[in-house]
Every structure is written in structure tokens, then in C-alpha cells.
Image (cartoon, rainbow, N blue to C red):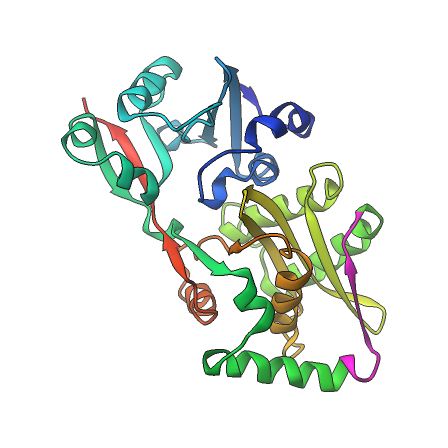
């Protein structure tokens, strides 16, 4: 297997165009972006399929394979076992509950130990719900947006637009300011420090890897941005979303504009997992997901 890099995108793009998995980890731009962080993603093309692995820095025991992206269909448990034996790994992670629903019972249990990745369940929303925010359950969101609009939008202090390569340097400067507020460089092994590296990679490849981005300027200064990528035919992933927390209603305004301007041709928005962070879980639940997709690891039995 070779390391997954920017230069592999055009080779793999067509193979991923109909990939069937609904977990956010199977977004090709995201796999590439995260490969330059605290982990290394690798791949190989064999027999018309793409085989993927994540190598954990400094701890080979934590390395694993992903479900392969095949030309047609999804692999059986027997095929997964053969895949692991061929490539020299012990487990497949980020296996969605969709897969377990299709292949369950004694056949799967006889080959693998199944363990849930509780912190990596993805939150799924209807794009229409987040674009319109209708009903009593979204009343608090609408109120915060109205406050933001009265203070900034109605006073002509706000400009929204696409995040393209030309805005990347200024967006990187905003990211540094945001990280100073969050102290996300404090520990290079922590989630926020690793995510920062992935965001930087996404900004540097915003046009090259077919990301879609949106930014919000307040008084001419970038104060928020968001970046998404395609996943399946009807679902995209909101990979990164950053906004100055001191600006009341800005995050809610950004969320709504993401649904309207980035996901206009998708039915569903995957807002990724909460990583076991309680505050993040509360925030994601407050937008009323229509579904949570659980994630699992399958480890070979001896």
C-alpha cells in the first residue's frame, strides 16, 4: 500500500463516485486531508477495488483497514477476512451498522469480534430541515439567527460567499485566531490539534480536491467558514465548521447558510460524530438529527 496523497485524487475520484458507505470516513477528500495529520492513510488498487488502511503513528496495534470500495457491491465477512489476511491487518474499523444489518448472525460472529466505536457514530440531518429551520424545535436557532441578522446583516456588515483558493491565505489566518481561542495547539496528539492539520490541508486544496466551502465576513474580516465534501449520491459531509464564538448567533447563521449554499443538491447532511465530547454531542442533538449511524470494528478471531 502507498500513502494517500493529493496526487492520488484524480485516480481515485471515479472509483469513489458510487461508493455505498454512509459513514463520513469514506469521503475521499477527507481521507486525503487526514492523511497528513496524526495518522497516515494508505491505499492500494487491486482487481478494480480500492483497499484502504489507517496506520496509527507510534502504535501499530491501533492500525486498521476500512471497508474496501469495490467496483460493485460490498464485501462479505468471508471476503473481509481474506482481505485482512492478504494485507496483514487484524481488524476493519468504521464498519457501519448498515453493514451489520446486511451481514449478521453466526457467519459474522464466527469470524470476528464485533465492538462498537461509540464515539464515532455519525449524525444525519435532512438538508431541508437545516436550511429552513421550521417548527418549534428550531425556535432557539431562529432567535439567535435573528439577533445576528439585526446586529450585522441588516446593517450591511456581513458578506457571505464561496471559499475558494483565493481566500485560502486569509482563511488560514482566521483559523490561527480561532485556534488561539480554543488553545487547540496545546497537545499535538489531541483531536483539535490533529483536526487543525486536516483543516489546513483542506484549505490548501480547496479547489484541487473538489471541496465546497463558504465563508462569512463581518466588517470585511473572515469570521467564519465551513467546508464540505461529497459522500454518496444523496449525502454530503460537513467536514469542518469554524466561527468566532464571541459573535452571538454566528454559528447558527453559518449552519443555515451551509445547508442552503453547500448542500443544495443533497438530501442529507452528515455532520460527522461527536468524538465522545459531551458539549459537541449536545450541539449536534440540538439540530434534531433524523438518524445516527453507529460505527463498529471487526477484529479477527484467532
Q: Is 234 part of what is drawn in magenta?
A: no
The quarter of the picture where the C terminus appears is top left
Q: Residue 185 appears at what percent x and percent y?
A: 60, 53
| Residue 211 falls in image quadrant | top right
In the image, what residue occupies the spot 75% across and 52% down? 172
Residue 261 located left or right of residue 186:
right
Q: Is residue 157 magenta?
A: yes
Stretch in magenta: 153-164
Of residues 238 and 91, which is closer to you in this image?
A: 238
Residue 185 appears in the figure: no
In the rendered image, which quarter is residue 276 located in?
A: bottom left
Q: Is residue 109 above or below residue 241?
A: above
116 with respect to 56 (left or right):
left
Which is nearer the eye, 95 or 38?
Answer: 95
Q: Residue at x 49, y 14 (%)?
A: 46
Q: What's the residue at 48%, 52% (across, down)?
A: 272
Q: Position of residue 132 (x, y in %)?
A: 59, 72
Residue 243 location, quadrant: bottom right
42 and 153: which one is in front? 153
Amino acid at each position: 500500500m502507498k500513502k494517500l496523497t493529493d496526487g492520488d485524487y484524480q485516480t481515485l475520484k471515479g472509483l469513489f463516485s458510487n461508493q455505498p458507505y454512509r459513514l463520513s470516513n469514506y469521503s475521499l477528500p477527507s481521507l486525503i486531508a487526514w492523511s497528513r495529520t496524526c495518522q497516515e492513510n494508505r491505499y492500494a488498487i487491486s482487481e478494480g477495488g480500492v483497499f484502504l488502511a489507517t496506520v496509527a503513528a507510534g502504535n501499530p496495534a491501533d492500525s486498521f483497514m476500512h471497508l474496501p470500495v469495490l467496483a460493485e457491491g460490498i464485501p462479505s465477512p468471508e471476503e473481509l477476512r481474506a482481505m485482512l489476511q492478504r494485507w496483514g491487518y487484524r481488524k476493519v474499523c468504521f464498519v457501519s451498522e448498515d453493514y451489520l444489518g446486511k451481514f449478521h448472525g453466526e457467519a459474522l460472529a464466527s469470524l470476528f469480534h464485533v465492538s462498537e466505536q461509540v464515539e464515532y457514530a455519525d449524525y444525519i440531518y435532512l438538508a431541508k430541515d437545516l436550511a429552513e429551520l421550521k417548527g418549534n424545535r428550531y425556535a432557539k436557532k431562529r432567535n439567535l439567527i435573528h439577533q445576528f441578522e439585526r446586529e450585522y446583516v441588516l446593517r450591511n456588515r456581513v458578506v457571505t460567499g464561496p471559499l475558494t483558493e483565493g481566500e485560502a491565505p486569509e482563511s488560514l489566518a482566521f483559523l490561527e485566531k480561532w485556534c488561539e481561542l480554543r488553545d487547540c495547539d496545546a497537545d499535538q496528539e489531541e483531536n483539535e490539534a490533529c483536526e487543525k492539520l486536516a483543516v489546513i490541508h483542506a484549505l490548501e486544496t480547496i479547489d484541487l480536491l473538489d471541496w465546497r466551502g463558504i465563508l462569512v465576513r463581518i466588517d470585511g474580516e473572515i469570521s467564519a467558514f465551513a467546508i464540505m465534501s461529497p459522500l454518496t449520491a444523496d449525502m454530503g459531509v460537513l467536514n469542518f465548521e469554524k466561527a468566532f464564538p464571541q459573535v452571538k448567533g454566528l454559528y447558527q447563521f453559518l449552519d443555515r447558510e451551509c445547508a442552503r449554499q453547500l448542500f443544495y443538491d443533497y438530501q442529507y447532511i452528515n455532520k460527522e460524530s461527536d468524538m465522545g465530547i459531551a458539549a459537541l454531542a449536545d450541539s449536534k442533538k440540538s439540530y434534531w438529527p433524523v438518524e445516527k449511524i453507529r460505527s463498529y470494528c471487526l477484529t479477527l478471531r484467532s
